[in-house]
Image (spheres, rainbow, N blue to C red):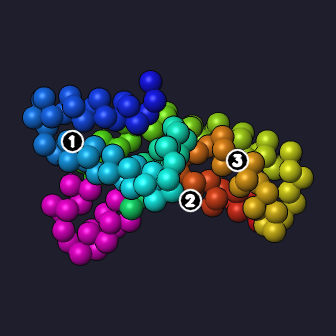
């Protein structure tokens, strides 16, 4: 089943179960997916839907940081709940060892020697780690290994 269809089915089940917060988050995700489809005049496949969901999670993490500094615990809780719902649609996260092995493999295959080659390594790692690891953290790890 396509990821978008699964999200739509979950929306219907959340409606039937009366889960208002979960339903609202799922509707936000579907709206973001639909918006991108309309903007680009395409139908998104699973990797593109994952990219939309990852972007939404990243936005919520940034908002949590802002709300924590502003002392808004109620909004932090709401954003955290939305992240929990959105993460259900992401594939299982990579372990630290898997990530290190993937980065090592990418460095070896690209022949990267310095931070200047970071783009090559990121290009090799991204398709395999997309949706399974925080790309910001992956970037920092690659920079540490090359630097």
Q: Which of label 2 and label 1 is nearer to you?
A: 1
* Residue furthest left in the image: 18
**Mark 2 or mark 3: whose residue is earlier in sequence:** 3
Label 3, on which residue? Answer: 125
**Tag 1 near tag 3, CB within 8 Å:** no
User: Which quadrant: the N terminus?
Assistant: top left
Q: Secondary structure at mark 2?
A: helix
Asked if the magenta segment contains residue 78, the reply would be yes
Depth check, front residue: 107 or 21: 21
Number of numbered discs present?
3
Q: Where residue 118 sits: x, y (%)?
A: 76, 62
Measure the alpha-carbon separation of dots 2 and 1.
27 Å
Q: Is residue 114 left or right of residue 15?
A: right
Q: Secondary structure at mark 1?
A: helix
Callout 3: 10 Å neighbours few (<14), some, many (20+)?
many
Disc assigned to residue 136 = 2
Local crowd at mark 1 within 10 Å, few (<14), some, or many (≥20)? Answer: some
As drawn, 85 above or below 79: above
Q: Earlier in the sequence, mark 1 or mark 3?
A: 1
Query: What is the span of residues highlighted in magenta in the rendered image?
Result: 60-79
Which residue is at a point 24% across and 35% down the rendered structure image?
A: 11
- Of residue 141 and residue 130, the one placed in the foreground of this image is 130
Whether 43 is among the magenta residues is no
Q: Position of residue 129 (x, y in %)?
A: 62, 43
Task: Write down the residue under mark 1.
Answer: 22
**Would residue 21 be found to the left or right of residue 114 on screen?**
left
Tag 2–tag 1 contact (CB < 8 Å): no
Residue at the spot 24% in from the left edge and 60% down from the top edge: 76
Residue at the location (15% across, 61% down)? 74
Examine the residues drawn in magenta and state their main secondary structure.
helix
């Amino acid at each position: 089943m396509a990821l978008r269809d699964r999200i739509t089915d979950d929306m219907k089940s959340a409606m039937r179960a009366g889960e208002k917060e979960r339903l609202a988050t799922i509707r936000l995700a579907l709206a973001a997916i639909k918006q991108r489809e309309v903007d680009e005049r395409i139908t998104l496949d699973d990797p593109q839907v994952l990219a939309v969901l990852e972007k939404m999670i990243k936005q919520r993490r940034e908002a949590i940081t802002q709300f924590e500094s502003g002392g808004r615990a109620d909004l932090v809780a709401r954003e955290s709940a939305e992240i929990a719902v959105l993460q259900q649609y992401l594939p299982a996260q990579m372990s630290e060892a898997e990530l290190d092995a993937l980065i090592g493999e990418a460095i070896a295959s690209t022949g990267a020697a310095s931070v200047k080659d970071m783009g090559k390594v990121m290009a090799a790692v991204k398709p395999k780690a997309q949706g399974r690891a925080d790309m910001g953290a992956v970037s920092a790890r690659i920079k540490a290994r090359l630097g």
